[in-house]
Image (spheres, helix red, strand yellow):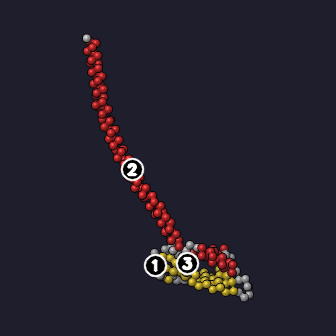
C-alpha cells in the first residue's frame, strides 16, 4: 500500500507542479501574448489606414513637384529684382559666338510697371548679315522674357559685307 500512496502523492505533486506552472507562468504569458496580438492587429490597422492616406498623397506629391518645376521655369523667364548682370554676360557670349564686334552695350534706367520692372538695354554691334541673324536667333532662344523695342540695320558702303545693327532691347523682372 505504501507504493500506491507514494504513487498518488507523486502524481499529485506532479499535477500540482504542472498546475502551478500553468497558473504562474503559462497563463500570464498567454495573456501577454494575447495583448501583443491585439496591439499588433491595431497597429496593422493603423498602418493600412496610413498607407491608404499616403496613396492619396503620392499623386499630390507629383503635382507639387510639377508645380515647383513650372515655378522654376517662371523664375528663369521672369526673375525677381532687376538682375541684369547674368543676362548681359549671356548677350556678350552670344555676340562673341556669332562673331559680331560689340560696339556698345549700355543698360538704361529701369522703368517700373504695375507688377514688373522693364530694363532697356541699348546694343550696337557689327558683322555680316548671317552672323547678325544667328545672334538674333540665339537671343530668341534665351529663356528670359525680353522684347526688341527697336532694331536698325545699316549697311556699310565701304565694306558691302558688313552691317551695323543698333538695337533697343528690354528685359523684364518681377518686383520683389
Could you give the CA–CA distance between mark 2 and mark 1, rounded to whole angstroms? 48 Å
Asked if residue 88 can be seen in this view, the reply is yes
Quadrant location, the C terminus:
bottom left
Note whether 78 is above or below 157 in the view shown.
Answer: above
Residue at 31%, 37% in the rendered image: 31
- First reached walking from the N terminus: tag 1 or tag 3: 1
Circle 1 is placed at which residue position? Answer: 115
Could you give the CA–CA distance between mark 3 and mark 2, rounded to whole angstroms? 53 Å
Residue at 63%, 78% in the rendered image: 136
Q: x, y (%) of residue 129? A: 69, 81
Q: Is residue 120 left or right of residue 131?
A: left
Note whether 39 is above or below 109 in the view shown.
Answer: above
> For numbered disc 1, what is the local secondary structure?
loop
Of tags 3 and 2, which is closer to the observer?
2
Note whether 41 is above or below 90 in the view shown.
Answer: above
Quadrant location, the N terminus:
top left
- First reached walking from the N terminus: tag 2 or tag 1: 2
Could you give the CA–CA distance between mark 1 and mark 3, rounded to whole angstroms? 15 Å
- Tag of residue 146: 3
Circle 2 is placed at which residue position? Answer: 47
Q: Residues within 10 Å of mark 2 (few under 14, many from 20)?
A: few
Amino acid at each position: 500500500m505504501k507504493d500506491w500512496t507514494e504513487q498518488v502523492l507523486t502524481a499529485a505533486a506532479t499535477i500540482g507542479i504542472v498546475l502551478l506552472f500553468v497558473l504562474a507562468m503559462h497563463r500570464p504569458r498567454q495573456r501577454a501574448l494575447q495583448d501583443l496580438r491585439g496591439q499588433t492587429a491595431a497597429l496593422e490597422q493603423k498602418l493600412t489606414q496610413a498607407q491608404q492616406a499616403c496613396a492619396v498623397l503620392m499623386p499630390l506629391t507629383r503635382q507639387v513637384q510639377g508645380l515647383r518645376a513650372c515655378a522654376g521655369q517662371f523664375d528663369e523667364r521672369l526673375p525677381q529684382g532687376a538682375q541684369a548682370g547674368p543676362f548681359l554676360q549671356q548677350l556678350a557670349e552670344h555676340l562673341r559666338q556669332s562673331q559680331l564686334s560689340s560696339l556698345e552695350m549700355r543698360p538704361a534706367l529701369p522703368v517700373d510697371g504695375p507688377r514688373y520692372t522693364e530694363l532697356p538695354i541699348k546694343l550696337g554691334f557689327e558683322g555680316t548679315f548671317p552672323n547678325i541673324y544667328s545672334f538674333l536667333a540665339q537671343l530668341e532662344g534665351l529663356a528670359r522674357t525680353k522684347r526688341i523695342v527697336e532694331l536698325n540695320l545699316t549697311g556699310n558702303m565701304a565694306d558691302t559685307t558688313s552691317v551695323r545693327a543698333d538695337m533697343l532691347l528690354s528685359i523684364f523682372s518681377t518686383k520683389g
